[in-house]
Image (cartoon, grey):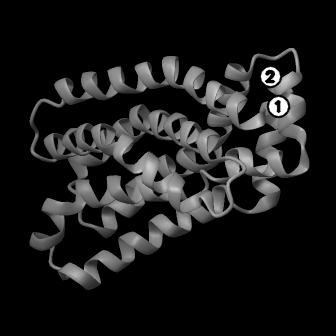
Amino acid sequence: MLALLKRDLVLATRAGGGFGLAVAFFLILCALVPFGVGPQTEALRPIAPGILWVGALLSCLLSLDRIFALDHEDGSLDLLATAPLPLEGVVAIKALAHWLTTSLPLIVAAPVFGLLLHLPGNAVPWLVVSLFIGTPALSVLGAFGAAITVGLRRGGLLLSLLVLPLYIPTLIFGTEIVRRGAQDADPVTPILFLGGISAAVVALVPFAAAAALRVNLR
């Protein structure tokens, strides 16, 4: 499993679709919003939690179709399906690699992007906490969508249509954590809900994604 994780991290780095692309997209989005709604603090501060979480969500979405597509094209996905490692484990490792190469850089860069949107300083730690808890669910749900659409031509749009509705609960509670943090309100309840969603997704969805892969590889 460690060898597979290392391989995926190396491939993501070499392909150039991991670390830099998601962070660059997030930065461009945060830079464009003030042009659309105005640069005033009063205009940006109330919408900053939602914009930051939507930006993180869309940045994660950019590289989802690469989770299984490259392995399917070169035939290594068939080898992984027949390897001693359970296919559910393969899905979990690939989702972990996606989180490490896409979401983790976003979490590190998010405080800086929060400053661009005039996010209050007391909300920045809660932004990091919410992304750290919620983004694993985004990667695993994305792996599920990628497993369903693997092998389909131009499956990227279908993948987005499948995955985006599944992201809604994570988006709601992630944004609520940051919003309550900005207002110095108690964010424990949305943290518990977001943690429960991530735990359930990480525990259950790899089995559904593995089943989808088995169907597509027949």
Q: Residue at x 34, y 56 (%)?
A: 54
Number of disc labels: 2
Q: Mark 2 touching mark 1, by CB under 8 A?
A: yes
Residue 39 visible in image: no
Residue identified by numbered label 2: 1
Residue type at numbered disc 1: Leu
Specify few, some or many for label 1: CA neighbours under 10 Å numbering under 14, 14-19, or 20 or more. Answer: some
Residue 47: name its quadrant: bottom left
Q: Residue at x 77, y 43 (%)?
A: 9
Expressed as whole percent of the image width and height from the top left, the position of residue 62 reads 56, 59
Question: Looking at the rendering, in which quadrant would you find the N terminus?
Answer: top right
Give SS at disc 2.
Answer: loop
**What is the spatial separation of the Cα atoms under label 2 and label 1, in whole angstroms?**
5 Å
75 versus 42 height, above or below: above
| Camera-side residue of 153 and 210 | 153
Label disc, if present, on residue 4 of the rendered structure: 1
81 versus 56 height, above or below: above
Give SS at disc 1.
Answer: helix
Instruction: Please indicate whether residue 180 sits to the left or right of residue 92 in the image.
Output: left
